[in-house]
Amino acid sequence: MDIDELVKKAKEIGHDHVPEPKLEDTNALDLEELLEHDLSEHDLGSILDLVARASWWVSPRVYQSIQVVYPKARRTRGKEIRGQIIDGVRLWYNEPAQKAFWLALDKNKEQIKKSYVCHIYDGSVWDPAHFTNLANMTALPKCLQSLSEWKPVAEVLKYHAYKIY
């Protein structure tokens, strides 16, 4: 199916105001762009409010006492191996960040079901100064986790972190 057929199909299923699609190498229709176009300001606001209400944050008082819980840890990347030490920094998956977040809330991961600890800033997981920085993390219900990567939601999370800390 080519791009014109996809746009026609989108209109047939109720997407009356389909924006001109951005063509990329794969000629893919950008579904996020379609969604953002279809959402009224009210609908988008409702989604952002939902994410803001559902997100969990560390208390500013706790953050004032300790900002970076494990300053000698960062996430692996590429072919790096978990447990490896590079320049005095131990490489992990996301375990130290999750542990730091839940300890700061006086919880353990087993007490909270269907949650996901998200880093707010792109690329921050590879920097020991930000990997376990409590202002760089929030927890969301697992069903909302993927929204944290959507630009409007990511910007709201950054704003909340700025206002809180």
Image: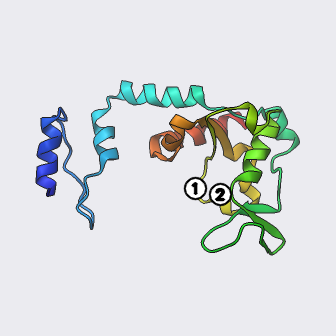
Q: Residues within 10 Å of mark 1 (few under 14, many from 20)?
A: few
Q: Is residue 69 visible?
A: yes
Answer with left or right where residue 14 lies relative to residue 52.
left
Spatial separation of the CA atoms under disc 2 and disc 1: 6 Å
Name, please, the residue furthest toward the right. Answer: 65
Q: Nearer the viewer, residue 109 or 68?
A: 109
Quadrant where the N terminus is found in the figure: bottom left
Q: Is mark 2 in CB contact (under 8 Å) with mark 1?
A: yes
> Which of the 4 image quadrants contains residue 127?
bottom right
**46 up-or-down from 146: above or below:** above
Coordinates of residue 82 in the picture (x, y in percent): 72, 66
Coordinates of residue 95 in the picture (x, y in percent): 73, 52
Quadrant where the C terminus is found in the figure: top right
Q: Residues within 10 Å of mark 2 (few under 14, many from 20)?
A: some
Label 1 SS: loop
Q: Name the residue under label 1.
A: 122
Answer with left or right where residue 20 lies relative to residue 84.
left
> Which of the 4 image quadrants contains residue 126?
bottom right
Coordinates of residue 39 in the picture (x, y in percent): 32, 32
**124 up-or-down from 156: above or below:** below
Answer with left or right where residue 141 lies relative to residue 103.
left
Q: Name the residue under label 2.
A: 124
Residue at the spot 30% in from the left edge and 46% down from the top edge: 31
**Residue type at mark 2?**
Ser
**Residue type at mark 1?**
Asp
Label 2 SS: helix
**133 up-or-down from 27: above or below:** above
Coordinates of residue 133 in the picture (x, y in percent): 75, 49
Q: Can residue 132 be seen in this view?
A: no
Residue at the spot 77% in from the left edge and 72% down from the top edge: 84
> Which of the 4 image quadrants contains residue 42?
top left
